[in-house]
Image (cartoon, coloured by chain):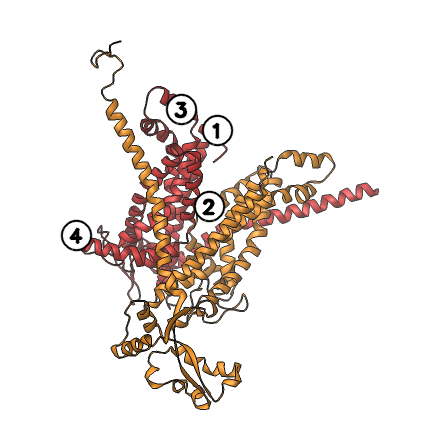
Chain colours: A orange, B red
Amino acid sequence: MKHKSKQNNPFHDPSLKKRHASAMRFKMFATACIIFAVSFLLFFLSDMVIKGIPAFQQSYMEIDVTYNEKTIASTRSAIDKKYRRIVSRAWLRDIPAMVEENPELMGTTQKTWVLLNHQVDQYMKGHYYKIKDKDLKVVDEMKAQGKIELKFNSVFFTHGDSKIPENSGLRSAMIGSVLTMLVTMLIAFPLGVMTAVYLEEFADDNRWSQLIEVNINNLAAIPSILFGLLGLAVFINLFGMPRSSPLVGGLTLALMTLPIIIVSARAALRSVPDSIRQAGYGLGLTKIQVVQDHVLPLAFPGIMTGSIIGMAQAMGETAPLIIIGMIAFIPDSPSSIFEAATVMPAQIFTWASMPERAYIERTAAGIMVLLTILLSLNALAIYLRKKYEVKW
Amino acid sequence: MNAFESKTRQNELIELFIKAVLISAATVSILTTFGVLFSILFEAIEFFQLRSFWYFITGTEWSPGVPDSKFGALPIFSGTFIITLIAMSVALPIGLGSAIFTSEYASPKLRDKLKPLLEILAGIPTVVYGFFAAITVAPFIVKFFAALGLHASFNSALASGVVMGIMIIPVISSLSDDVIRAVPRSQRDASLALGLTMSETIKSILLPSAAPGIIAATLLGLSKALGETMIVVMAAGLRPNLTWNFLEDMTTVTVRIVDALVGDHEFDSPDTLSAFALGLVLFVVTLLLNVISVTLIRRFKEKYKINTL
């Protein structure tokens, strides 16, 4: 059969080529968008890792250290004069404590691995930051002898914040985060679950419960910094609670986390089929008994998932905690919820504004630790949800 | 009363008690909203007793700290506006484009892999974004524009705006994805059956139907951008600057709030109280955006009788 020519074919649409080309361009645009989003994520994560990995190593030097009465009083004299400029002040400060813990050091001279200051450390990692030429000569000399090494930076996990970069670590911030999260969850979890139970099981559709629903919606949309203003004006000024404490921080974050817990708890309660409740009523149980013994246990996995996700979000919050003062310089770990403390994101913020170059890698390392914790929490939530998901 | 009746009476009392406890717990959320409103309102009123409200809204000079301090917030509002504008012009196309891809062009398996990745973007703390903006993006922008012969500040509005936009992408994309998928399949199938290409179907049928939801998503993203603090504190400037040039440094409402409260001022001075005045403006604007957004979504749900949103 002969092909009809294009001019005679009534179904030939001359604009079809254009339309297909336009359709292809549109699809490419949409694809480009998602590729951008995903590649940004990958680029960003790798940037953080590249910047943060150096912080997990720290420069140490093996030299003779003398421990006796004179050197304990004036710790600079414990090491040879030519090394005094490059050894960390913080390490020298610890000598009296070291001797107290190991009395057999007294009166001896030992070869010890000594922490070097941050200018030398940065030079060892390839950056020049405020290091003088004569110090460079000493460092190069010791490097050639193999006496300077990059060892694992355990200081990062055992020390709190410090004005001396090589001596600073994440410990006090981590403990502060734990205490604050404790307060947050102890307040937000019961309040949130009770509100959800009320709204799902007990509320009649009256003005009061509608008002509560609208309020929860609004709470979720309020910018986090305004919760900080609330904490400052009410908890600190009106109630007189201690500033910068995990107590105030936890209370403020609890109010922020309430909407998330309420919404996910309600979804979990709603997913329990009505037949369970009806069966309970049919057997003569009261409403409380049905909720307590049947609905809540079945909804529990969903509630846990929502709470873990809420906790992960609260852990990354910084703005409200800054307003209530949790960015104070906190070298020692807090031992109660009433003492001044800081949290991990606030520590990251503080380090990011420090001038010394050594803090850049520590900030990135702190970010890596924080992101790892958050990702694990989210993964745990998803795992729990999949494991306990019941298809009714 | 026999034993059965007294047990029932006991149960009734316990039920009432527990119901009261639950209602009080639920009331906390109402107390909180009003707590936020009144604590800010109270201090803001104190501020407006010391300084003129009209000048606050329209004045262009913001100079705290001097005895004759002026508090004209217009440069601060404009800074917020410009950075938010940059953020939305990044977030809206990319967020919507991503949503279109995940809802229409991606296979279910690909979609299952992509959505968690976008969720991760949403879960990154803003202080981390701020560090990235200050350490990586801002220097890059300075170098890039220097190569073009233009001067960009290290605290350019562009740097914080772009990173803020990336942070908002998941907000827009996840809600838009839900609303696009919620449009009934019948409309999609009818359009394709009539010979429209996929892109024409999306552009002329699906997007207009999903428009209320997409607008709601945009408003939510906008509200989030307005209230964002850490990215701008770390990457934007402190100086109120009334200009259109996004390569210059400018400051936002949230940065000024932090700056006013973290410094060593007396609590009742106009410097500190200005934070609450700014906070009040922020509260009202974000609340309005949220109310409009919720109303739009409710109407969309009613129109298509959807329960899944």
Return the residue nearer the eye: B26 or B214: B214
Front disc: 2 or 4: 4
Q: Distance between the residues labelled 1 and 3?
A: 15 Å
- Which SS class for mark 3? helix
Query: Which amino acid type is marked by label 2?
Result: Asn
**In the orientation shown, which residue stands out farthest toward the top?**
A1
How many residues crowd around disc 4 within 10 Å: few (fewer than 14), some, or many (20 or more)? few
Q: In which quarter of the image is the C terminus of chain A?
A: top right
Task: Kindly identify which residue carries mark 4.
Answer: B148
* Chain ID, mark 4: B
Q: In the rendered image, which quarter is residue B199 located in?
A: top left
For marks 4 and 3, the one nearer the N-term is 4
Task: Kindly identify which residue carries mark 3.
Answer: B187
State whether residue B159 appears in this view: yes
The residue at 72%/39% (across/down) is A285
**In the orientation shown, which residue stands out farthest toward the left?**
B149
Task: Kindly identify which residue carries mark 1.
Answer: B305
Q: Position of residue A316 (x, y in %)?
A: 45, 55
Q: How far apart are marks 2 and 4 (CA)?
A: 45 Å
Q: Distance between the residues labelled 1 and 2?
A: 24 Å
For marks 1 and 3, the one nearer the N-term is 3
Q: In the rendered image, which quarter is residue B264 located in?
A: bottom left
Return the residue nearer the eye: A276 or B261: A276
Query: Are discs 4 and 3 located on one and the same chain?
Result: yes
* Chain ID, mark 2: A
Q: Quadrant of the N terminus of chain A?
A: top left
**In the orientation shown, which residue stands out farthest toward the bottom?**
A70
Query: Which amino acid type is marked by label 1?
Result: Lys
Q: Distance between the residues labelled 1 and 4?
A: 53 Å
- Which SS class for mark 2? helix
Identify the disc placed on residue A218: 2
* Chain ID, mark 1: B
